[in-house]
Image: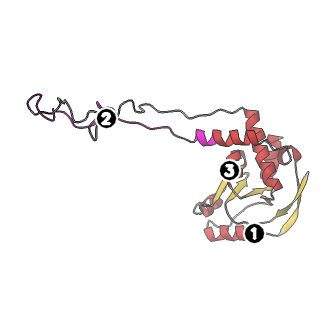
Amino acid sequence: MANVSVYNIEGKEVGKIDLSDAVFGVEVNEHLVHMAVVSQLANNRQGTQKAKTRSEVSGGGRKPWRQKGTGNARQGSIRAPHFVGGGVVFGPTTERNYTKKQNRKERRLALKSALTYKARENGIVVVENIELSSSKTKDFIKLLEDLKVTGKTLIVVKELTDNLILASRNLSNVKVIESHEINTYDVLNYNNVVITEEAVKMLEEVLR
C-alpha cells in the first residue's frame, strides 16, 4: 500500500494518506489500457462525413452543348462525376458509426492500471481540498505553482464549483473533472494528476 503526502492549496504538507493497492497498486495490463484508449478515441468520433451525388450537386440543369454537331461527346449535365465540381460516385452518404465496445470489467481494470502506472511514476498529487475564494485565473495558476505542478495537469475533485470552473477554463493545459468522470485516456494523457482526498476515497470505493 503506497503512502503519499497530502498537501493543502498552499503547497504545504498536512498529512499522509495510504493509497489502496486494489486501485493504485494492481498489475498493469497494457493490452487493456490500449483497448480502453482506442475505444474512447473512437467513440469520440462523429462520423458525419457526407459526399453529394450528381443528383444533389447544384447546377447542371441544362445540357452544356447540343447533342450533335460539335464534335464533342454528348453530355447531359456539367454535374456528371467526370466534370470538375460534379457529383461523387459511391461516396459516403450515411453517418458512420465508429463506436467500439469494451466490457465494464475491462474498462475498470484499464483505469486501475493507468492509475497504478501514474502512482509509480510519482505523477499523482493528493491535496486536502481545492477551494478557491475567487474565479481569477491567476489564483489558480498560483495554486499549481505552490503544488510545484508543471505541464499538462488533470484536476480531479469530488464536486465542481463555479470558481474552479471559471478559474481554470482559460488554461489549455489544464482539465478539471469530477471523480466519476475520470477515465484511462485522461490519466495517461496528462503529466500530473492532482486529486483531492475525497476524490481518492470515492475512487477506492467505486473501483475496489
Crowding at dot 3, Cα within 10 Å, few <14 / some 14-19 / many 20+, comes out as some
Crowding at dot 1, Cα within 10 Å, few <14 / some 14-19 / many 20+, comes out as few
Q: Is residue 193 left or right of residue 53?
A: right
Q: What is the magenta range?
A: 39-68
User: Which corner quadrant of the image does residue 107 belong to?
Assistant: top right
Q: Secondary structure at mark 1?
A: loop
- Looking at the rendered structure, which numbered label has been put on residue 140? none
The verdict on residue 18 being magenta is: no
Residue for badge 3: 186
Q: Secondary structure at mark 2?
A: loop
- Looking at the rendered structure, which numbered label has been put on residue 148? 1
- Looking at the rendered structure, which numbered label has been put on residue 87? 2
Amino acid beneath label 2: Gly
Picture residue at 57% right of the left edge, 42% below the top: 44
Q: Classify the position of the C terminus by image quarter.
A: top right
Residue 154: x and y in percent read 69, 56
* Image position of 189 with respect to 148: above or below: above
Amino acid beneath label 3: Asp
Q: Earlier in the sequence, mark 2 or mark 1?
A: 2
* Image position of 19 with respect to 132: above or below: above
User: Which corner quadrant of the image does residue 112 belong to?
Assistant: top right
